[in-house]
Every structure is written in C-alpha cells, then in structure tokens.
Amino acid sequence: MAYEILKLCKVAQRADMKAAGYEPFVFEPAVIYPATIARIKQVLKDGSLPTELIDKNLNPDVDPRSAALMHRSRIRAIPEEAWDLALKPRSEFTDSPDDAGLLVIRADALEAARLWFTRALKNEVGKPVGVHILKDDDYRL
Amino acid sequence: MASGWTNRGKYKTLGVRYRGQTNPTNFYMLLATSATAPTVDTNVVSDLTQITAGNGYTSGGYQLTPGATDYDVWTEDDTNDRALVQIKDIVWTASGGPIPTSGGDARWAVHTDDNATPANREIDQYFDLVSDRSVSDGQTLTLQDCEIRLTE
C-alpha cells in the first residue's frame, strides 16, 4: 500500500504561513486520518519500516531510520482496538466511565496518526511546513 | 507523559503578543535530571538540576532560533481547537565520553529563554523523557517531535 502524503492533502492558500517561511498544506480529517490509520495498520501487520518516515535530510551522526523506528515503536504501544476507535465519530462516545478509557486510547491513536502524517509531510517536502487541519468533529479528541 | 507549559511561559508569551515585549533572540532546549520534576509552577533553570555539561552537551542546552528552520512545523488544528509548533530534531552527539559525563541522567527537556546566565533562564515548556536517558561515547541523544501546544 503506497502512502503518498502529497495526494492526501492540498496546498493551502495561507499567505501568513508562506511569508513566515513555511510551505502551507491543508488537511481534511476525513481523508488524512483514515488513510494514515490504514497505513499504520499495514505497518503493524507486516512489521515493515515506513519509508515515508525515513529522514532524507541526513545528519551524519543520526541513523536516518531513527524517526521511523520511533514512530513504529509508538504505534506498537497503542492497543490494537484504538485504531478502529479512532475512526469512530467522537459523538458516539458518552461521558460514562466505560467510554473514558476508550477515549484515552482513541486519542493516543489519533495523535500518533497526526504525528505520523506531519512527519511524512515534512520529509516529503524537505522544508518547514504549515499544517492546517480543517474542522471535523468526528475526529475530535 | 507530564509535559506542558509553565505559568511563567504563558505569562511571558502573552507579554510578547499583547504587551509589545521583546521576544528572546534565541531559545534553548536544556536537559535536566530527575532530581526535581518541572511543573506549571517552575520558573527558572535553577529550580531544576541540569545534567552535567561536557562530552558534547553544553551548559544551557541546545540553542534554537525563532523561525521556520528551528520550529519547522506550524499547525492550526480546527478539529481540536488548538495550535501547535513543532521543534526540529535536536541531536547531541557524545564525544570523548558519555552524556551526561557524570551525575544524574537526563529525565526532562525544558525549553527556555536566552538569559546570559543559564541558571536564570526562564522556562516556557517542559517535556517528559519518560525515563532516564544517557548515551555512550559516539552515540546520539535525539529529541524528536517536541511540540508546543496552545489550547484553551
């Protein structure tokens, strides 16, 4: 499964970000989170190292795989059920004690996904990036 | 993970934004031991115990310059009503011996201003490294994906 980050977002019309030295991109949560979580599930299943997270701007002292290894460790530490919970709309959870625990691991999964696609974007663009995540309450933490 | 802003950091940030105070020329990311855990009420570096300098770690920590190069991801998150800035990867390479050279290992990373005296630097945010960290000669200690988050 190819994870092509630039096909999962659009160039944003953000003059403020551009003027500050960032390449601006806009993300629709309903696009980026399912795609990223599908990618994460694939990595968890086949044990591969995500190439999109391997650094291209190499510091000779640092293993370029280090970020990819770190992200893979992070996703392995998150309960498997969290990935499906992350795709469940926030409105389907209540304030009950039972749901409280589910919301915690759901949030861990969504944040891991966000950091994943942010890193992938930064690696692909090779420059500082501005990220605008549009509003979608289904993906609220 | 017990990371977050200090009250001093919030206070100073509002001062720059709304009171026309001058932003520091530089910031620093400093490593501290587990001797004292930073909290919202921690103000300056002397409130904590910095790791021993040497072998590639300079007292006061790693210098950062405000701008896109060192703060290389800038996020507006309308889904979660927050904004975030991500700091670039920070790398210390141990040379001539381990980091830290002696004493307690690194347990916290703290983001400070640039007061000329490291002990007097004001802390804006603190990051939990989860466990004590040290590296041997030739190895690197890297901070990745450190984020400064602003939410109401």
Image: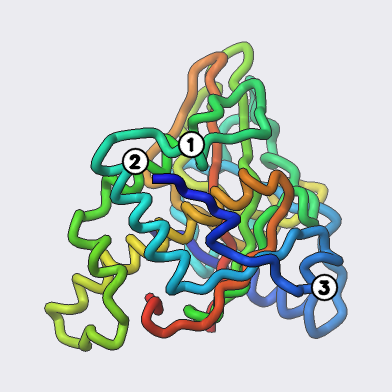
Q: Position of B136 compared to A38: left or right?
A: right
Dot 2 or dot 3, earlier in sequence: 3
Q: Are marks 1 and 2 on the same chain?
A: yes
Q: Nearer the viewer, residue A85 or B47?
A: A85
- Please name the amino acid that badge 2 sits on: Ser
- The amino acid on which the numbered mark 1 sits, given as a three-letter code, is Thr
Relative depth, front residue between B146 and A120: A120
User: Which quadrant: the C terminus of chain A?
Assistant: bottom left
Kindly report the distance in space between the C-alpha atoms of the residues bearing marks 3 and 1: 31 Å
Question: Which residue is most to the left?
Answer: A98
Cβ atoms at labels 3 and 1 below 8 Å apart: no
Image marks 2 and 3: residues in contact by CB distance under 8 Å: no
Q: Is residue B17 left or right of residue B55?
A: right
In the rendered view, tell whether residue A91 sits above or below residue B28.
below
Q: CA distance from mark 1 to mark 2?
A: 15 Å
Query: Disc 2 sits on a residue from what chain?
Result: A
Q: Which residue is mark 1?
A: A51
Q: Name the residue that disc number 2 marks.
A: A73
**Residue at the image point whose x is 41% and y is 57% from the top:** A36
